[in-house]
Amino acid sequence: MTSSNTQGVTVAIAGAGLAGLCLAQRLVRAGIDVHVYEGDSGPFVRRQGYRITVDADGLGALRASLPDQLYELALAVGGEPGGSFRFTNSRLRDAFTLTFKAAEDGERQMDRQTLRSILLMGLDERVHYGRAAVGVERGDADQMVLRFADGSSVSASIVVAADGIGSALRRQIAPGANPVDSGMAGIYGRTPLLQAGRSVLPEVLDNSGVLALGDEPGRAFFFTTMRFRQAPQQAFARLAPSRPAPAGDDYVMWGLVLRQQEAPLGVRTDPQRLRELAARLASGYHPLVHRLIESADDDTTILSTFAIGQRPDAWPLPRATVVGDAIHAMPPFGAHGGNTALRDAALLGGKLVDAHLHGRSVESAIAAYQTEMPSYAFKAVDTAAAMMRRLTGSGRVQRMVMTRLLPSLHRVTVPEPSIIRA
Ligand SMILES: Cc1cc2nc3c(=O)[nH]c(=O)nc-3n(C[C@H](O)[C@H](O)[C@H](O)COP(=O)(O)OP(=O)(O)OC[C@H]3O[C@@H](n4cnc5c(N)ncnc54)[C@H](O)[C@@H]3O)c2cc1C
């Protein structure tokens, strides 16, 4: 394959998640011809309505990739900046608290479905649904061929795998990088914040995320609030009036950490049984935790297994690469998976646009991305894996300090049973 510059270049992205769409936005803005092929049959066929914490890296990537108006829209519907994160015991008594700066470019809570709606804007003709990628290979001349499960294929100068943790293309593009199963998992749900006109959370937790460590190893319960800064209906009417606004009721997102062996196979895709399992495994937790589980939305409870990405051995296809969870899956401790995926998109997009503007080769742009990405991405993987081991492992002293000693030094954080405020 000869090295060539980016004039007339075409890009095929497999996967319309956060990374794939963010990359597409960056490339379209620079006039590069890009198409995104998504395995799902439509943009929102799976309920993925959870909230993600978008940090400074994620916000920087969105700012670099989105047109100004869409970035403004993302900030408008994100939560208020700032807030805190509490580590507590199972009775929600504080061990210690981290406080975040309330800067505009600091850290924001964002509803994933709303963020995805924004990332899809302007890409209508460029996102193709029901196209599950199954393989990639070199084609004629400078072309790559992306193959789909239905037997069809497309040719493009560059193929980018952004197809998430179960990537069908990773083996070919980044051999040796298949993630390792951690044996741990999370049951995630979302619960309306307002119930009968009252907040389900006490005032003390208004702007806090909480990770409540269980008394036994391998157990933790996490929850945080998604409060839209401006209702999506209003923000979309102001900044994207031609687009339907996603639903925008505030909610509490929660997750129960468990060992995979505790979730029988027949339960894993059944939201009702997952909630029952979560309630059972959280016995002994504060009544507020039970209230969150019991009043969760019916169809939004999911089980997600935690995997740990591995550094690739080689990159054998100079015109193909991988971004996001497809290359660096990480357990959700520290909230870096989505942010790192967005950062990849901005980095790769920036390198390709730079090559486009200065007549440099696409191979060198991709190679530069592949040199830079592993250092920050696998640092995040290592940090998340270490945090998971620390917080869910069997270290008795550490658990005793976090669940007994430190909480004993604090006043009761959430009184029982007065968990609903007027
Ligand atoms: C409950 C929960 C909370 C989280 N909270 C945070 C957080 O606070 N902060 C944070 O940074 N991260 C968070 N994460 C992680 C974050 O959501 C992921 O890291 C992020 O979505 C990865 O983006 P991605 O684009 O790489 O993959 P995905 O978002 O998984 O997108 C992959 C896309 O590819 C599609 N696809 C799959 N296979 C194929 C195929 N063969 N062909 C074509 N398309 C395919 C999928 O349908 C999907 O649309 C959270 C995750 C969960 C589950």
Image (cartoon, rainbow, N blue to C red):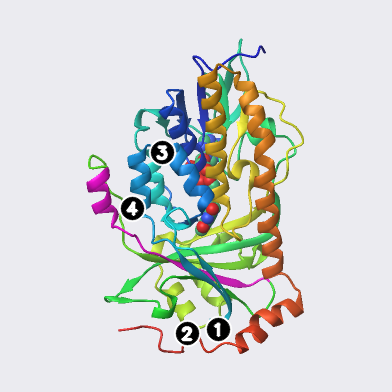
Mark 2: which secondary structure? Answer: loop
Quarter of the image that includes the C terminus: bottom left
Mark 4: which secondary structure? Answer: helix
Marks 1 and 2, Cα distance to the nearest angstrom? 7 Å
The three-letter amino acid code for the residue at tag 1 is Arg
The three-letter amino acid code for the residue at tag 4 is Ala
* Mark 1 touches mark 2? (CB < 8 Å): yes
Dot 1 or dot 2: first in sequence order is 1
Residue 19 x, y percent position in the rendering: 51, 41
Dot 2 or dot 4: first in sequence order is 4
Viewer-closest of 159 and 75: 75
- On the image, numbered disc 4 is attached to which residue? 76
Which of discs 2 and 3 lies nearer the camera? The answer is: 3
- On the image, numbered disc 3 is attached to which residue? 66
Residue 338 x, y percent position in the rendering: 53, 49
Dot 1 or dot 4: first in sequence order is 4
